Amino acid sequence: MALKFDLLSTHPSGARRARIHLPHQTVETPVFMPVGTQGTVKAVPQQILEELGPNRQGAQIILGNTYHLYLRPGHELIARLGGLHKFISWPRAMLTDSGGFQVFSLSKLRKISDEGVRFRSHLDGSSHMFSPEHSMDVQIALGADIGMAFDECTEYPADESRAAESLKYTMAWAARSLNHFRANQRKVPWHNDRALINPINPDGSPASQSLFGIVQGGMYMHLRRESAQRLVEMDFDGYAIGGLSVGEPRALTLETIAEVLPLLPKDKPRYVMGVGFPDEIVEYARMGVDMMDCVIPTRAARHGLLFTSEGRMNIKNRQFAEDPNPPDPNCACPTCSRYSRAYLRHLMQTGEPLGGTLNSIHNLAFYLTTMANLRAELEATPPEVAAPELK
């Protein structure tokens, strides 16, 4: 078994309270997943990630990036060292993306064909080829609990012919990804460094990796419907909605999610990739999204933007120069429990790396707390269906 999904309740808004049992962790949803692009959630040590949020429960699952880890230090090296979990000393669940979005971002350095995408490294200009099969080989070597099918992300704006061409690649690559993954997937090298109980196999024996398909189609709803329906027929372990937060208006993001979610199986995880601000992830979760990720909490933190219970705060502003209060008086994270707004501003003004670290710790705690509070609210709210009949 690779993944077990328990849908606990469905609410009138569409929100779902569920559990995803993965080899390294049982993940309570709706969940926000911090992004650890190059084997690290930027500036935040793993032991701190494990203790953020309410009751110090920490991040349940983080992301790794196939493209970046392929280039440095290399997937084969990581595999020789025991897989990505072991390499970065992360005992909980992990998801790796396919590299498709990063290749998409190299628009001037890539060439797309039926075979895959040939691109030049942003590091040294060297030439590389990513095919669906190669993306699967890299992700299998990394050994994360969940991998993603190789897709072609459609830019915004894109005309319908461009979106249709992009979808053609994505659907063909999805089938090839799934076939290659099923033929070559290996057992996740589960390790018991923190005395956790393996959620899939309590005896500690490894479980298989999972693979999610990615719905694309740009901002054309008929293409999105086609993509979702064809992916469901392929029978992936879970489904993601990709190609959002690429510059489209928020109204289109909402329309796309609302269009796709009802087409996805009720008995499998639903993941929206690359979103968003705190209010956005709550809104998407209320629509029925189970999983979300975004670089915003750490990227914003490095520029001095904090998310607090009192709204957004630019800690670099002069008004905080002599402010002895914690960044968020309603937050119990390590940053807010110990440091003042004046000190955080000083760190940002002087360019001290600690500023980015402390800001990131707070923002991640805020995101994790936001999701934990939403889960508690759903548990306290009478569901539409207490014990859903899954179809």
Image: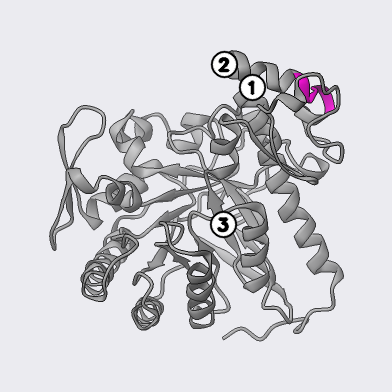
For the rendered model, the colour scheme is one colour
Residue linked to disc 1? 355
Mark found first going from the N terminus, 3 or 1: 3
* Mark 1 → mark 2, Cα distance in angstroms: 8 Å
Q: Observer-nearest residue: 21 or 154?
A: 154
Position in image of residue 24 (x %, y %): 58, 47
Mark found first going from the N terminus, 3 or 2: 3
Q: Observer-nearest residue: 332 or 154?
A: 154
In front: label 3 or label 2: 2
Residue linked to disc 2? 351
Q: Is residue 283 above or below residue 343?
A: below
Residue linked to disc 3? 292
Quarter in which the C terminus is drawn: bottom right
Please tell me whether residue 340 belongs to the stretch shown in magenta: yes
Q: Amino acid at mark 3?
A: Met
Position in image of residue 214 (x %, y %): 39, 65
Q: Is residue 188 above or below residue 259?
A: above
* Residue lying at 39% horizontally and 62% vertically, measured from the top left: 243
* Magenta residue span: 337-342
* Residue lying at 61% horizontally and 65% vertically, measured from the top left: 290
Position in image of residue 232 (x %, y %): 41, 78
Is 168 left, or right, of 147 in this rendering? left
Q: Can you see residue 202? A: no
Marks 1 and 2: CB-CB under 8 Å? Answer: yes
